[in-house]
């Protein structure tokens, strides 16, 4: 209907975006121009983006530093109004944002719709949280009956660095959280998905965030990420991306030799699902296949290692093979497509190498066929392997690859411990109709988010906040009631 027609208007090659770093509201033409190609067909482009150079980065931090006193002195309710207005503008411009998620990140239309919804939810939720918790001082009563008051305020210039897999929702969520508390912001989107970030920042400016308060610096880790981390004036940093990059960022921040600042890092996972013999195989297979292959496995929550109790393994494993043959890999724009492309050539090469290694070290359970046109883009055929132990996997493989391990009922605690010992702690799925088993797993597993008798996909802002522990992140959870506090300072009144 009209909804589809509106999106279609942005889908043609005639629509090309031209974007630049935004510093003090100015579009900075740096001459370092990069062409953005679509993951499903590299002969198609979505537009061009100039990356920020060193002078542009310095100017953005200078302006953000100078703008901090005025912005942090504004009432929290005024800053919250800017977030609600941003949400309105995102809703008004949904068709363009959906098209950008699709053309720049290769997301399916349904994933793109969900993504815009999540970005809007972040804006509205953090606006409401700021009005509730940051507008007036909090008063507490201590054990002697004495009253204490604290006021939450911003910290200064906040750096926000985000990944390509939720190019609108995660990017905007970090930025508006930092802003609404009273910080000024320098933001760097992932280099693969800068066009949508530019549109999001333009909407925030249009919604009333002053142009000297919020700056966008497109570029890669070396040209932009490193300087917005190493600058001594940075008062806090929000990062979502891989664990390795978070570790690098921590080292860079520490090497500044100034006071430590808060780092809110949401990082990778090695997510497991535990299936016991009381579970329902049809439901297990439906949820496991969706958890592993939705969004081409490029969700941080995605299932990587499925542990199946050996009593039902010979029923479940052939069913996984069947379900994989039934899913379809294709153009993300089509409703018939279950699995689209992966983000770029580098990701594709890494995943194909892993598949080759698993073909030797594990046993292939099944693969999903690629369409004839797959070599126009960066597609990876979804694959599932049976392996002996989670220890065969070292780092996260961010794509459509599922590993299956059999376990004996008596070894359940040991299995949970080996999962914990991976050091990651993001999501875990559990399929069991035994409530005692569910409770036992929930107690022992060191993860941020548990999904019981459902697929391991998604988070809901304000309802099911998301975030991990250990190598998977520092917390507090995005979309949760404690998130904004970490961006702020408590002033005792
Ligand atoms: P990445 O670590 O490669 O990049 C993330 C961001 O860091 C990008 O903007 C990149 O340019 C920047 N960067 C790279 N080097 C840098 C440096 N030296 N200094 C500063 N910034 C630097 O991650 P990615 O491939 O974009 O995203 C996928 C990863 O993100 C996966 O590991 C996934 O699990 C994780 N992720 C986690 C969550 C979560 O909530 N825990 C959510 C989404 C994605």
Image: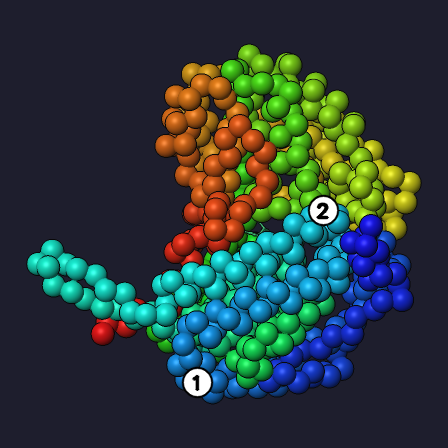
Q: Categorize mark 1 by other alpha carbons within 10 Å: few (<14), some (14-19), many (20+).
A: few
Q: Residue at x 23, y 72 (%)?
A: 492
Q: Is residue 408 above or below residue 53?
A: above
Label 2 belongs to which residue?
110
**What's the image's color scheme?**
rainbow
Q: Is residue 50 above or below residue 287?
A: below
In the rendered structure, the answer to whether residue 342 lies left or right of residue 141 reads right
Q: Position of residue 91 (x, y in %)?
A: 66, 61
Q: Residue 365 lies in what quarter of the image?
A: top right
SS state under label 2: helix
In the rendered structure, the answer to whether residue 71 lies left or right of residue 240 reads left
Q: Position of residue 459 (x, y in %)?
A: 54, 45
Label 1 belongs to which residue?
70
**Number of numbered discs present?**
2
Q: Residue at x 78, y 65 (%)?
A: 36
Q: Categorize mark 2 by other alpha carbons within 10 Å: few (<14), some (14-19), many (20+).
A: some
What is the number of the mark on residue 309? none
Q: Position of residue 46 (x, y in %)?
A: 81, 64
- Residue nearest the observer in this picture, 6 or 267: 6
Q: Position of residue 289 (x, y in %)?
A: 67, 31
Dot 1 or dot 2, earlier in sequence: 1
The reply to whether discs 1 and 2 touch (Cβ–Cβ < 8 Å) is: no
**In which quadrant will I find the C terminus?**
bottom left
Distance Cα–Cα, label 1 vs label 2:
41 Å
Q: Quadrant of ligand 1?
A: bottom right
- Residue nearest the observer in this picture, 334 or 208: 208
């Amino acid at each position: 209907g009209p909804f589809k027609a509106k999106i279609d208007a942005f889908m043609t090659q005639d629509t090309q975006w031209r974007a630049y770093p935004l510093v003090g509201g100015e579009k900075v033409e740096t001459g370092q121009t990069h062409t953005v190609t679509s993951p499903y067909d590299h002969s198609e482009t979505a537009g061009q983006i100039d990356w920020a150079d060193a002078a542009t980065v310095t100017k953005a931090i200078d302006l953000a530093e100078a703008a901090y006193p005025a912005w942090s002195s504004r009432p929290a309710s005024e800053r919250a109004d800017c977030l609600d207005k941003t949400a309105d503008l995102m809703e008004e411009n949904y068709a363009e944002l959906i098209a950008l998620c699709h053309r720049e990140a290769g997301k399916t239309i349904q994933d793109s719709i969900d993504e815009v919804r999540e970005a809007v939810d972040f804006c509205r939720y953090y606006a409401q949280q700021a009005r509730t918790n940051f507008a007036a001082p909090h008063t507490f009563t201590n054990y002697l009956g004495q009253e204490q008051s604290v006021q939450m305020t911003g910290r200064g210039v906040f750096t926000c660095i985000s990944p390509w897999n939720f190019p609108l929702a995660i990017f905007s969520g970090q930025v508006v959280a930092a802003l609404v508390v009273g910080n000024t912001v320098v933001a760097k989107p992932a280099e693969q998905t800068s066009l949508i970030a530019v549109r999001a920042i333009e909407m925030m400016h249009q919604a009333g965030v002053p142009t000297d308060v919020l700056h966008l610096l497109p570029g890669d880790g070396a040209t932009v990420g490193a300087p917005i981390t190493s600058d001594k004036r940075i008062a806090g940093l929000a990062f979502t991306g891989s664990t390795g990059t978070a570790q690098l960022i921590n080292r860079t921040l520490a090497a500044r030799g100034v006071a430590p600042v808060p780092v809110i890092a949401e990082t990778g996972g090695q997510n497991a699902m535990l299936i016991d013999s009381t579970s329902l195989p049809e439901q297990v297979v439906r949820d496991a296949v969706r958890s592993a292959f939705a969004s081409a496995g490029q969700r941080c929550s995605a299932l990587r290692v499925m542990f199946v109790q050996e009593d039902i393994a010979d029923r479940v494993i052939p069913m996984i093979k069947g379900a994989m043959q039934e899913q379809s890999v294709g153009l993300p724009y089509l409703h018939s497509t279950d699995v689209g492309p992966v983000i770029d050539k580098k990701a594709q090469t890494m995943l194909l190498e892993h598949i080759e290694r698993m073909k030797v070290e594990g046993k292939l359970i099944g693969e999903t066929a690629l369409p004839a046109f797959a070599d126009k883009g960066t597609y990876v055929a979804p694959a599932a392997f049976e392996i002996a132990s989670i220890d065969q996997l070292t780092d996260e493989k961010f794509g459509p690859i599922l590993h299956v391990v059999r376990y004996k009922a008596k070894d359940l605690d040991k299995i949970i411990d080996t999962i914990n010992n991976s050091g990651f702690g993001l999501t875990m799925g559990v399929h069991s109709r035994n409530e005692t088993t569910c409770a036992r797993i929930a107690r022992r597993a060191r993860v941020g988010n548990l999904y019981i008798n459902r697929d391991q996909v998604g988070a809901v802002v304000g309802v099911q906040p998301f975030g991990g522990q250990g190598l998977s992140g520092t917390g507090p959870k995005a979309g949760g009631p404690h998130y904004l506090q970490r961006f702020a300072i408590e002033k005792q009144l």
